[in-house]
Image: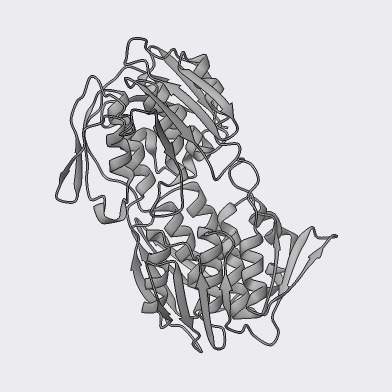
Amino acid sequence: MASFIVEGGHRLQGIITPAGAKNEALQVLCAALLTREEVVIDNLPDILDVNNLLALLQSMGASVRKEGKQCAIHAETIDTAYLESREFLSSCNRLRGSVMLIGPLLARLGRVTYSKPGGDKIGRRRLDTHFQGLIALGAAYEYDAELQAYVFTAPGGLRGTYMLLEEASVTGTANIVMAAVLAKGTTTIYNAACEPYIQQLCRMLCWMGADISGIGSNMLTIHGVERLHGTRHTLLPDMIEVGSFIGMAAITGSELTIQNVSIPNLGIIPATFRRLGIRIEQRGDDLYIPQQEHYRVESFLDGSILNIADAPWPGLTPDLLSVILVVATQAEGSVLIHQKMFESRLFFVDKLIDMGAQIILCDPHRAVVIGHDRQMRLRPNNMSSPDIRAGIAMLIAAMSADGVSRIDHIDQIDRGYERIDLRLNALGAHIRRED
């Protein structure tokens, strides 16, 4: 198991480019199974979750050719015997994104066996939206107690229908959309997730020959087609990396340019950091964060304490709340962080409290952060990353601490951030990887 040894107190300076979006990558790689022709993905991030999914696609019988940031997937044949093996179930169990294999495999093969997925340990993450949507499309579902796996079958093919999702699940919407593009008839999905990465998936499917309207809204209409063909697709930059770099620049008092960020697809992320008092300038498609010794948290117009909460798009992504919480520890003023969508993502704050942060954990979903305004530097600490986003938040805290910190279990960070230590060291950070 690898660790980061982080010497805090060093400013960053220079230009950094976000990698391709992890969440989009997992969706479109699964979508490549919907055609027997080649699909080429550009700007693919070199991260653990993506590489594990590529290895799984190869084990399933797909041809995978990767050169730099480009990857070609050709799933002309699929090894159905492997899909029934315990090895396949075990691989799925280690990768949360593998849940999005269900829709494409069910649409193409009429059967898929799937175990409970792994991923971040951030509390209960239901799969009801996925399953209910596939059942509405005509799939039969049962649980195999011996295999400890879910078995979906649709021997007569899937059929289009109207459905109202009980939650705007991003991966649930992706799964249902990928199943519906090859279903007979018309499917209408109301309360669909409409994040930029879902929009990207839908556009890619349309380039492959799918018929999808309503892209960008919460109502998608899909007219099923007989077959899809190959295409080429370029991933958006990862908005979570962009937000993480903003946070790093602010808390270390650094001057940083984040280039090629696709500003229209960042939503309210820059505005949320500005509410913490962080200066952010837009320069074309780049974001410039000037060196800033102090940043002051805004209050609401009636003078009440600022409340930052996650919400489905176009609200704030939950993946950045951990970063925002850490950055707030060195602001002037107080803020309430409300993590609505996951019940265990705030439990890492005890490590920040050990570092000297003033945080009141109200319950599993809410924490009040009382900013130091840099009057007290965070103390170094030994920590272990429980998930991707807590891991990057711990790294940001360690970069601002007065001394040397250790972060164990950094494979969690590697799942979502491409060579983050090398990229940050090139800007002036002091991070050493220890295996």
Figure check: 56 above or below 303: below
Q: Residue at x 58, y 34 (%)?
A: 386
Rendered image quadrant of residue 12: top left
Q: Residue at x 55, y 36 (%)?
A: 345
Figure check: 269 above or below 367: below
Answer yes or no: is residue 213 visible: yes
Figure check: 42 above or below 435: below
Q: Residue at x 45, y 80 (%)?
A: 37
Residue 272 x/y as whole percent: 33, 39
Q: Is residue 15 left or right of residue 52?
A: left
Rendered image quadrant of residue 234: bottom left
Q: Nearer the viewer, residue 366 or 102?
A: 366
Residue 148 x/y as whole percent: 79, 57
Q: What is the residue that sits farthest to the left in this orientation?
A: 283
Q: What is the residue that sits farthest to the front in this orientation?
A: 302
Q: Which colour style is shown?
A: one colour
Residue 250 x/y as whole percent: 28, 28
Q: What is the residue that sits farthest to the right in this orientation?
A: 146
Rendered image quadrant of residue 123: top right
Residue 101 x/y as whole percent: 58, 66
